[in-house]
Amino acid sequence: MMRKTSKKFQEFLASQSVEIVEQFDTKTTGELRREWRNTFALGYRVPTGGLFWHVFTYEHAVYITGKQALKRFNEESPVAFVVFPSPSADSTCYYCKAEKMPDFSEYRDDLFVCNRGLDWTMAYTHEEGLGPFYSRKEWQTWYTDS
């Protein structure tokens, strides 16, 4: 898996016409990742240093993938969103704005995009041909309603 530094990641965001509104500190980043796990990783404990997208490949979340996922992601409002690499790649989270949802598929590393309220998420992986995965918070009720 390719590891990118925060500076390189910031350059990538700029190349996608993404404006960084805020770079979260370590505490806020940790809280956001915990909230993400509590929303989308129901029934799956992501191991320390583990890959968050395994939530999808191990079938612990309801999701769509591939072209369907990209279509739904592109329908989301790009006004503001959170972007964060996998915890094992980088510890930085960004609150961003863009006029249209950016194409993060070129990043070629684990990357997660969500709105601040975690109503939806898009997970890109470093694996060629695997993902991306799109999921919504309300889809996860199947796990908690039983």
Image: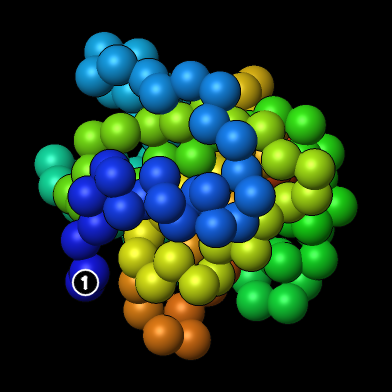
Would you identify the image quadrant in which residue 46 lies?
top left
**Furthest residue toward left:** 48
Give the quarter of the figure containing the N terminus: bottom left
Residue drawn at 79 percent across, 57 percent down: 74
Is label 1 in a helix, a strand or a loop?
Answer: loop
Mark 1 is surrounded, within 10 Å at the Cα level, by few (under 14), some (14 to 19) or many (20 or more) other residues, namely few
Nearer to me, 51 or 55: 51
Height in image: 128 above or below 10?
below
Q: Which residue is mark 1?
A: 1
Nearer to me, 98 or 110: 98
Height in image: 128 above or below 107?
below
Nearer to me, 33 or 43: 33
Please name the colour scheme applied to the rendered image. Answer: rainbow
Q: Give x and y (percent) for residue 54.
A: 36, 60
Residue drawn at 13 percent across, 41 percent down: 48
Height in image: 46 above or below 68?
above
Q: Give x and y (percent) for residue 144.
A: 58, 32
Would you identify the image quadrant in which residue 139 lies?
top right
Residue drawn at 29 percent across, 16 percent down: 25
Q: Is residue 138 left or right of residue 30?
A: right
Q: Is residue 130 left or right of residue 72?
A: left
Residue drawn at 67 percent across, 56 percent down: 102
Q: Give x and y (percent) for residue 123.
A: 51, 56
Give the quarter of the figure containing the C terminus: top right
The number of numbered discs placed on residues in the rendered structure image is 1
Residue 121 in sight from this viewpoint: no
Q: Give x and y (percent) for residue 18.
A: 61, 44
Q: Is residue 142 left or right of residue 109?
A: right
Residue type, label 1: Met
**Furthest residue toward bottom:** 129
Residue 10 in sight from this viewpoint: yes
